[in-house]
Image (cartoon, helix red, strand yellow):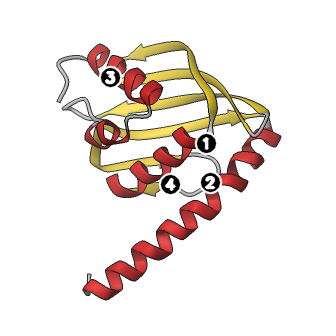
Amino acid sequence: MFASVADFSSEWHRLVAQKDLEALRQVLHENASIGAPPYWNRIEGRDLVHHLLGLVVATIDEFTYQREWERGHELALEFTGSVNGQELQGIDLITLDAELRLAKLDVLMRPVNAVIELRSVIAPQMAEFLVARSQANAASGA
């Protein structure tokens, strides 16, 4: 998909800054997974990861990457932002697949009050999405 990790990184920064959710879907591997607040268990699959990341991008204000580290097909991106006035700091740990698409994302965040605030905003929306998805799958016999 990308010629280099640097190309992926540039596109990642662009799509997050511009909240380009369609482009976000394109950089995710079909079996992408995310481990992130507000969930302890990993969320797996392009559709679920895409939806959760879309909620995060829409919820965190003044989201800015500060520093970046790269090793092979792995990136660590330090970020800052706020949720309903609660300042947060975190690190995105990204693992890319052989085609340089996002295969795995782990998000570490602090302080706990900001994580709790993020959860209070995102968890109900994610739950609503999961219920609707389950009902659609049941209706279609999937």
Circles 1 and 4 in contact, beta carbons < 8 Å: no
Label located before the other in sequence (2 or 1): 1
Residue 43 vertical position relative to residue 8 in the rendered view, above or below: below
Residue at 42% over, 21% down: 13
CA neighbours of label 2 inside 10 A, class few (<14), some (14 to 19), many (20+): some
Question: Tag 3: residue type?
Answer: Glu
Q: Nearer the viewer, mark 4 or mark 2?
A: 2
Q: Nearer the viewer, mark 1 or mark 3?
A: 1
Residue 8 visible here: yes
Residue at 57% over, 67% down: 127
Residue 64 % position (x, y): 58, 20
Identify the image quadrant of the C terminus.
Answer: bottom left
Q: Is residue 141 left or right of residue 24?
A: left
CA neighbours of label 1 inside 10 A, class few (<14), some (14 to 19), many (20+): some
Q: Which residue is mark 2?
A: 122
Residue 35 % position (x, y): 53, 47
Q: Is residue 81 left or right of residue 73?
A: right
Q: CA distance from mark 2 to mark 1?
A: 8 Å
Residue 75 % position (x, y): 43, 22
The disc at residue 42 is 4
The disc at residue 11 is 3
Label located before the other in sequence (1 or 4): 4
Q: Determine whether the residue tagged by mark 1 lies in a helix, strand or loop.
A: helix
Circles 3 and 4 in contact, beta carbons < 8 Å: no
Q: Nearer the viewer, mark 1 or mark 4?
A: 1
CA neighbours of label 4 inside 10 A, class few (<14), some (14 to 19), many (20+): some
Label located before the other in sequence (2 or 3): 3
Identify the image quadrant of the N terminus.
Answer: top left
Identify the image quadrant of residue 110: top right
